[in-house]
Amino acid sequence: MVRRVWGEDFRIIGYYTGLITIGVGLLMLVPMATSLVFREWQSAIDFGLSIVLTLLVGYLLALVSRTRNTPGLTHAMVIAAASWLVAMVLSAVPYVLSGHALSLLDACFDTMSGYTTTGLFLLQDLDHISQGLNMWRHLLTYVGGQGIVVLALTFLIGSTGGAYKLMVGEGKDEKLVPNVRHIAVQIWRISLIYLFIGTVVLGMLAIASGIKPQLAFFHGAYVFMSAWSTGGFAPESQNMLYYHSLPMEIVSMVFMILGSFNFALHYAVWTGNRKEILRNVEIVSFTITVLTTFSLTCLALMQRGVYPDAVALFRRGFFQLISAHTTTGQSNIYARTLVREWGPLGMVALTIAMAIGASAASTGGGFKGIRMGIIFKGIVTDIRKLLSPERAIVVGHYHHIRNNTLTDSAVKSAAVIVVLYVLIYVVGAVVGMAYGYPMADAFFESVSAGSNTGLSCGITQATMPALLKIVYMVEMWMGRLEFLSVFTLFGFIAASFRSLRRQSGAA
Amino acid sequence: MKRRITAYLSVVIVLLALAPAYVLAEEPPLVTTTELVEHSVDWDGKTVSFEGEVLEDVLARSDGTWLNLSDGNNSAMGVFVPRTVFMPVISWTEDYRTIGDAVVVTGVFHRACTDHQGETDIHATSVVVVTQGSTKDNPIHRDRVVWLIMLSLTLVVVMWLYYRKPDKDPGVQRGSREPPSRH
């Protein structure tokens, strides 16, 4: 039975959504400062306008729905899903004002892609946008990777009773330390230390590659944010091809892999538990699936003779594969090269890698390594049960931070989420095919959106049908929040209408 | 006389036959990024001409220079200019406030370059600046400044209302019903 919706429910949701919106507004100060540094006056004014508008919406929401009650699980789920939508629309304002987005829908597509660390984009003339807008694009992806709610928890909300539930609603359900605010702080501490290291290393490599020194560290920060957050954006339309630099690609690949790891694993390693790297079920799962999909990629590329030698094959093939598997989306080949040269088998290999994706509670998307590990171990345990004497008790285990017993409910939960991912992949692909795109291309692009990867085979363009844009946006949103909070939002809306009808019926 | 006319005609016919080949050899076809990527196998190893705006950075390396040339909306090609090839002075490169020099490059297209580990690129044999870059107009939209001021004033009022009595709890004061104990 679904419970009734009360006025106070709306107040709790409105109040916390308002606070998160204020956080988004304050975040825009960073790109505005960037524009001021580069003397991009109009861009700075655009950001000023966007900041004021976002803060106004945030404060109005918080003002009209101010409450002392803390969110329950249902509220938390609705807040997470709703605040992502509000953030998507308000963050799109600078895109629209810049004149580089053809419509509000296109701008929202890009901001949803940014927050969900997908990396697909419809922005026009990317090579001529302001540094401020470039900073905003990459900051969206960086914050989206850690989570907007995590950001708000760290700086605005504090350790309220429902804070942990808010984080769960956003897909960050690892309890690193007992205090929820400390979890948020730990996530940000890990990310900011890596940001510093990444910006310095990639910035120096950018200088060595010939990038102007005054821009090199911005390029370093952008590439780092894109890689660590498994986002896939780049400051130029050629993506990683712009740099013509093997060292930058290698370092970026390292950060993609690090970013795709579970925050709990990072925390375990940082607090001295280094053996966890070798034992963790997600790392084992990631290693096996990377080796399998890379073998498939090599087979495809060698069959077609795409690259002249092994070094070229490794540099292009392995980078693309890691980018796909970590759901990053950075690329060192042209999008259409996938279709024109890699062929169906190469695309299938990347599609499988994208579908599986990164680790749970990381910045990445896809099924997640832990679910693959649990389902695989569940199958093995069932086979062992069948082969054992009837009276024998067979129990499966998996290692994630500690040894865990494999329960039927854990296997079921993992399988349900995987089925939901497959469902959105298929829906997106069917809509793509309905618009006349070939099956391999439609599946590739749909899986890329749903798994928050961002590699494109050329379908994602401003000229593509509006419905397909919306379908990809919903895929990105659902994929990033892992369905539950989105379904809860839909359920809450339906329950609200039912309550309204009952009230008017009673009156 | 007849033999002389035949000889002249033969020369003319040979010249006419060779002329297109000569012209083609002198002026390679002007291609775009889209054309090169979509038909990479057909263009692989062929000499082409490519025109584009020099993007933000001229990437100098020990064995040459990389230029990234934009030839349209989100479309650019990497061009490698070896040290042996004359490199003109690039005075302007693209950024938000400037338009970069437009150059025409002639060179060999590589679908998967052996020198650059499979990169799709053009190895230039000549680089010519055809249009010098310039600064862009970056006008301030006054209407947006007005909006900024008006919205800022509204924000100040709303923030004042919000922070006026932070301890006030309207939910409780209005006597609204608490939601069921799910949290």
Image (spheres, rainbow, N blue to C red):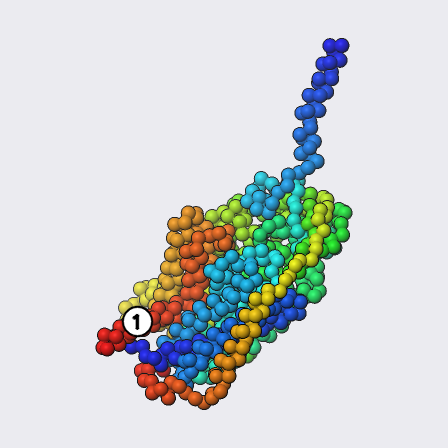
Between A498 and A290, the one nearer to me in the picture: A498
Between A256 and A155, the one nearer to me in the picture: A155
**Callout 1: SS:** helix
Graded by Cα atoms within 10 Å as few (under 14), some (14 to 19) or many (20 or more), the crowding at tag 1 reads few
Q: Quadrant of the N terminus of chain A?
A: bottom left
Q: Quadrant of the C terminus of chain A?
A: bottom left
- Residue drawn at x 73%, y 13% is B5
Q: Residue furthest top?
A: B1
Between A478 and B173, the one nearer to me in the picture: B173
Q: Percent position (x, y) of residue A451?
A: 45, 61
Between A330 and A7, the one nearer to me in the picture: A7
Instruction: Give the side of residue B113 with respect to residue A13, left or right.
Output: right
Q: Percent position (x, y) of residue B148?
A: 56, 71
Q: Percent position (x, y) of residue A335?
A: 54, 52
Residue A242 seen in render:
yes
Chain letter of disc 1? A
Instruction: Give the side of residue A25 with respect to residue A15, left or right.
Output: right
* Quarter assignment of residue A235: bottom right
Q: Which residue is mark 1?
A: A497
Q: Percent position (x, y) of residue A439?
A: 42, 49
Q: Residue furthest left?
A: A506
* Quarter assignment of residue A65: bottom left
- Residue drawn at x 45%, y 66% is A480
- Residue drawn at x 50%, y 51% is A458
- Residue drawn at x 76%, y 47% is B86
Residue A349 seen in render:
no
Q: Amino acid at mark 1?
A: Phe
Q: Is residue A62 above or below residue A412?
A: below
Count of picture labels: 1
